[in-house]
Amino acid sequence: MGDVRSSPKQIVLVVEDEPILRMMAVDMVEEAGFEAAEASDATEAVRILETRTDIRIVFSDIDMPRGMDGMKLAACIRDRWPPIHIILTSGHIPAPDVVLPPRAVFFSKPFRKEQVVAALLRMAA
């Protein structure tokens, strides 16, 4: 899928504690025409967001170790960086149980790549 936006590429922060799943998500984001930044947990994601002002979208798993999960990360992003769009995903939490902050979407795992890419492109428009 080609990049439909003008350069420079928009940045998507991928937050996933499972290395293989993170690598697959990064590939999906880059194939959609975005540049990917990576974090292995929510704490690392917050550190990255504190140092970078170019991240426009965060794509995060909900189920993560080491204290802060994806829901807490989403609340932190909405509080500290309101313009950032959020995509949350989980294979353990049913969609009806996910309470999303404004300008966020949720996809159950396994998600359809086409749906996530469409959400990324909508958020980047």
Image: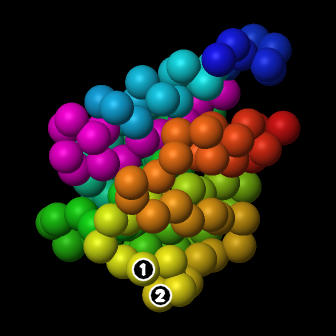
Q: Camera-side residue: 94 or 4?
A: 94
State whether residue 55 appears in this view.
no
- The residue range painted magenta reads 10-22
Q: In which quarter of the image is residue 120?
A: top right
Extreme bottom residue here? 97
Question: What is the secondary structure assignment of the residue under circle 2?
Answer: helix
Quarter occupied by the N terminus: top right
Q: In which quarter of the image is residue 122?
A: top right
Image vertical order of residue 105 relative to residue 49, above or below: below
Mark 2: amino acid? Asp
Would residue 12 appear left or right of 103 to someone viewing this image?
A: left
Q: Where is residue 64 in the image (x, y as percent from the top left)?
A: 24, 63
Q: Where does label 2 land, which residue? A: 97
Quarter occupied by the C terminus: top right
Q: Position of residue 11 (x, y in %)?
A: 58, 30
Q: In the image, is residue 12 part of the stretch drawn in magenta?
A: yes
Q: Where does label 1 land, which residue? A: 94
Extreme left residue here? 66
Find the distance from the CA under tag 2 to the CA under tag 1: 6 Å
Would residue 116 appear left or right of 94 to someone viewing this image?
A: right
